[in-house]
Amino acid sequence: MARQSDTKQRILQTARELFATKGVQQTSLQEIADRLGITKPALYYHFSSREDLVRSIVTPLLEDGEQFIARMEQRADVSAIELLEGFFDFNYRHRAGILLLLTEMTTLAELGLVDMVLSWRARLTRLVFGPEPTLQQEARAVLAFGGMQDCTMQFPDAPLDELRSATVTAARAALGIG
């Protein structure tokens, strides 16, 4: 059983690497199997399709993001700073998966995953500005939260603490909060 799990993890890692360099649609399951030195039927034992493989890669990211936002929504006392820091940490932790999401929007839309991710920004906006934000507040939130995601990918070699501080400070400015 542990061996199957190891194989599954190796498949996921190899798929992530190939998807990142070639794209999801340009990567065949045969290429993944060849890279791993396994047969295509062995790969199909773990994943029934390329879509199943993509879903397996992005599901942990989506679940973690949903759990983070739900925890914040359940609290009446969440501060904007705590929200921003937590959102940065989530994006930093999942930057490889988020990069896949951003580069494969069409594929992910077909899988029904994009709507969930896009709804997060609206929910985060309401957490910062209340249930009926103005257009200006919504625009500020898009810049702040989208910019935070971008910073985790744009500066992969920056020291974590420095990047976190700079990103949260910039997001606070974009949101117009002290």
Image (cartoon, rainbow, N blue to C red):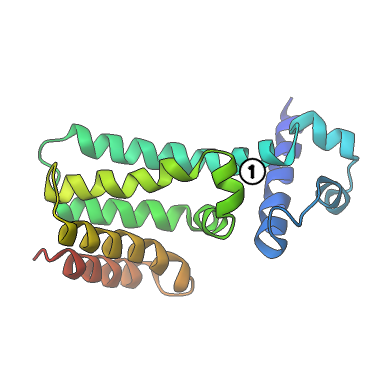
Instruction: Tell me residue 115's x, y (percent).
Output: 43, 42
Q: Residue at x 11, y 63 (%)?
A: 177
Please state which of residues 24 and 92 is positioned toward the viewer in this rendering: 24
Q: Is residue 55 placed above or below 140 in the rendered structure?
A: above
Quadrant including the N terminus: top right
Q: Is residue 41 left or right of residue 137?
A: right
Q: Quadrant of the C terminus?
A: bottom left
- Looking at the picture, which amino acid does disc 1 mark? Val
Q: Quadrant of residue 70?
A: top left
Image point (74%, 33%), residue name: 47
Q: Is residue 40 above or below residue 160?
A: above
Q: Of residues 123 and 73, which is closer to you in this image?
A: 123
Image point (48%, 45%), residue name: 114
Q: Which residue is mark 1?
A: 54
Q: Is residue 52 left or right of residue 61?
A: right
| Secondary structure at numbered mark 1 | helix
Q: Position of residue 60 (x, y in %)?
A: 51, 39
Q: Left or right: 141 with respect to 89?
A: left
* Crowd class of label 1 (few under 14; some 14 to 19; many from 20; radius 10 Å): many
Q: Relative to 34, does residue 45 appear above or below in the rendering?
A: above
Number of marks drawn = 1
- Quarter of the view holding residue 45: top right
Q: Give the residue furthest to the front.
A: 135
Residue 91's x, y, as percent? 40, 55
Residue 153 in the image: x percent, y percent?
47, 67
